[in-house]
Amino acid sequence: RVSGFILPGNDQPLWSVHGPLNPQAFDFEMAGILLVAFSMDPYDEIEFLSYELTSTRVADSGPPTGMAVNIQTITATALPFESVLAGKLGEIDAMPVVVSRSGGALKFWLADTPPYIIKLTSESPGGTTIWTMP
């Protein structure tokens, strides 16, 4: 099932989203946690279904008229471990996992111990965002 809330924009009412999801798919916003749970080894490749909620509009402006659920196949490929700078923790051996999806590529560096997700880069048409440990 899909359950959550979406705030569409300035002075717009909060949208509540609840309902069945068919076929079953993951919320890929939780991607890093999900990848850690798969316990991948270097060179493993996995595929799974993911969904993305988008608002539908009558025109380019104005409140949403509803919600659309887009289902896509996500492919995650693990690469050999490499040393990554993890802020105050220093250098940590982490496994890069490249994720291909329709919205752009993601690359996670995953460690075997907490905090697990050491670094993330997100590529999209608007540019690349890099998240690192403080």
Image (spheres, rainbow, N blue to C red):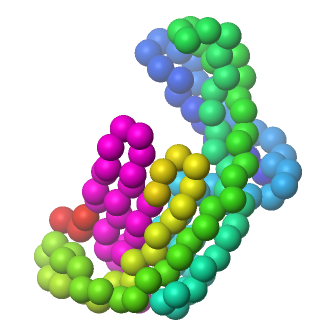
Residue at horizontal 61%, vertical 67%? 75
Q: Is residue 55 above or below residue 121?
A: above
- Classify the position of the C terminus by image quarter: bottom left
Q: Is residue 28 above or below residue 80?
A: above
Is residue 114 visible to us here?
no
Q: Position of residue 133 (x, y in %)?
A: 24, 68
Name the dominant secondary structure of the magenta segment: strand
Residue 115 screen position, x and y as percent: 35, 77
Q: Is residue 119 rendered magenta in the image?
A: yes
Q: Is residue 93 left or right of residue 105?
A: left
61 within the magenta span: no
The foreground one among 97 and 134 is 97
Identify the residue at horizontal 25%, vertical 64% (top origin).
132
Residue at 46 percent of width and 70 percent of height = 98
Percent from the top left, x then y, of residue 107?
A: 41, 66
- Classify residue 126 as left or right of residue 14: left
Magenta stretch in the rendered image? 106-131
Q: Is residue 125 above or below residue 15?
A: below
Q: Residue at x 58, y 49 (%)?
A: 102
| Residue 121 relative to residue 55: left or right | left
Residue 128 at what x, y percent from top left?
Answer: 32, 50
Q: Nearer the viewer, residue 5 or 44?
A: 44
Residue 54 seen in the current view: yes
Name which quarter of the figure residue 66 lies in. Answer: top right
Q: How many marks?
A: 0
